[in-house]
Each structure stands twice: as structure tokens, then as C-alpha cells.
Amino acid sequence: MPLGFFRVPAFSAGNWVAFSVSLGMFSIFLFVTLYMQAIRGYSPFEAGLRFLPMTLMIVLTAPNAGRVAQRIGSRAPMTYGLTVVSAGMIGMTFVQPGTPYWILAILFVLMGHGIGSTMAPMTAAVMGAVGPQRAGLGSAMTNTSREVGGVVGIALLGTVLFDRLGSALAPRLSELGLSVSQTESIRETAAHGFVSLGELRELGLTPDQVEGFVAAFRDAYMSGFHLALGIAAGVLFAAAIVANRFVPGRAHAVRVEPTRERVPAAID
């Protein structure tokens, strides 16, 4: 890929937005899934069903956002969508273990609407920056940015969440009167974000210790959950500023000559 394309503001901004959206979206799916199963006690199927408001809003919003971008350009819908997603994720930082699902559903609708408002205009911005002759290159680079964003989001924000979980859980474990081996086993298991009641009973915890651990784990997870989603919201809001500043109001292509390389002639 000719690196000169990164000198085109719309191309660089569009790929930064692709990175940021995937970072936030993968964070939502992973961390909220753990929240629903480990904290609220939903089964995997029940947790998946509760994501439907977000999924449906993405499906409904994306085509309309594409049509809006064709008329007025990508800047406004991208800025709007990223701001809405960021607001929804900030709302998630106030969610507690007992928060009614209808509040979560509203936040899911908000975030799904924001993601749907961003994706098609984002792709249009990158395509407009490289022109029709390089459409394949622009599409491939956008997909790469999405994949990298998802990987970095899970790795970076996952580290933040579980580091906060571990640091918040440690002092609470010392109050439960556990043995050294029990404490170490629980810490190792809790580092993956989920501890089943069966595992606790196998370790020999009394009912009172199990109840105390569940409360401690819930509080520690929510502390890391709020921090990780707060960081993701900040990244998405920064992407909204970048989109508003560097994505043009109307799509246009900037001609960038690729580096010429000598291509060997085909031999029959």
C-alpha cells in the first residue's frame, strides 16, 4: 500500500475511526457479556438475546446513514454517530449489578444507533479519499484497521479491567478467612473474569465465604468494568473530534500516485 495515502486527511481519519469503533464495539461485546453472565447470572443464550436491541439498531441505521453520507458527506454522520456511541458507553459506566434491563436496552439502542450511523459513512470517507481506482486498497485498509482495533481493544482494555479487578479483589479476599491455597486458586481463576459457584465449593469454601466472595467479586468486576468502558468512551469521543476536523463535508478523491515498482514480465 502506498504510504502516501496517509497524507490524505480523510483517509487517515477514516482509518482511525475504524480502529476506534472496533476497539469500542469489541469491548462492549466482551465485557458486557461477562457482566451479564458473571454478575447478573444469565446463560450465554439469554445474554445473547439481550444484545438484540443493539444489533437491530445497527441493521436499521446503517443503510440510512449511507444515504445521508451520499447527500451531505461523511463528516456529519460520523461525528454524530461517534458522539452517540461515546455517550452510550459513558452511560454504561453508571450501570450496577442490579440495574434494570430496560435501562441497558436503552443504552444498547443508543450505542447501536451510533455504530450504525458511523460505519457506512466511514467506509465512504476512505473510498472517497483514494478514488475508484484504489477502492480495493481503501476497503482492505479499513478492514485491517477494524481488525487491529478489535485486537488492541480486547488486549488493552482487558488488561485494564482485570488488573483493576485483581487489585480491588485482593484486600476483600483477606477478609474472608481463606487459606493460602484457596486464595491463590481463587485469584488465578478470577483473573479470567468468571468464577463459578461449583469451583468455589470444590475449594472447600463455606456458604458464608461463598456469599462474601460473590459480593467482593461483583464489586471488583464492576470497578474494572467502569474504568475500561470509560477509557473506550474517551477513545470514541476523540475519534468524533478527528472525524469532525479531518473528514470532508462531501466525499472527494485526492489523487495520490503510488510508488512505481518494476513488475517482471509474464513468461509463457
Image (cartoon, helix red, strand yellow):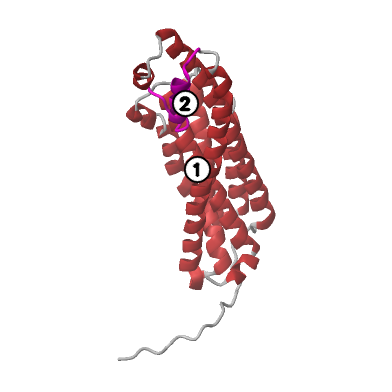
Residue at the extreme front of the image, as rendered: 180
The relative height of residue 134 versus residue 182 in the rendered view (above or below) is below
- Which residue is at 49% across, 48% downward? 151
- Which residue is at 55% across, 43% downward? 156
Image location of residue 216, percent across then percent down: 52, 18
The relative height of residue 139 versus residue 161 in the rendered view (above or below) is below
Magenta stretch bounds: 177-196
Q: Quick one: label 2, few (<14), some, or many (20+) residues within 10 Å?
A: few
Q: Closer to the camera: disc 2 or disc 1?
A: 2
2 or 1: tag closer to the N-terminus = 1
Q: For residue 218: magenta?
A: no
Residue at the extreme top of the image, as rendered: 208
Secondary structure under badge 2? helix
Q: Residue flagged by tag 1: what amino acid is it?
A: Ile
Image location of residue 170, percent across then percent down: 55, 23
Residue linked to disc 2: 184
Secondary structure under badge 1? helix
Q: Quick one: label 1, few (<14), some, or many (20+) residues within 10 Å?
A: many
- Which residue is at 64% across, 40% downward? 234
- In this view of the protein, can residue 61 be seen by the observer? yes
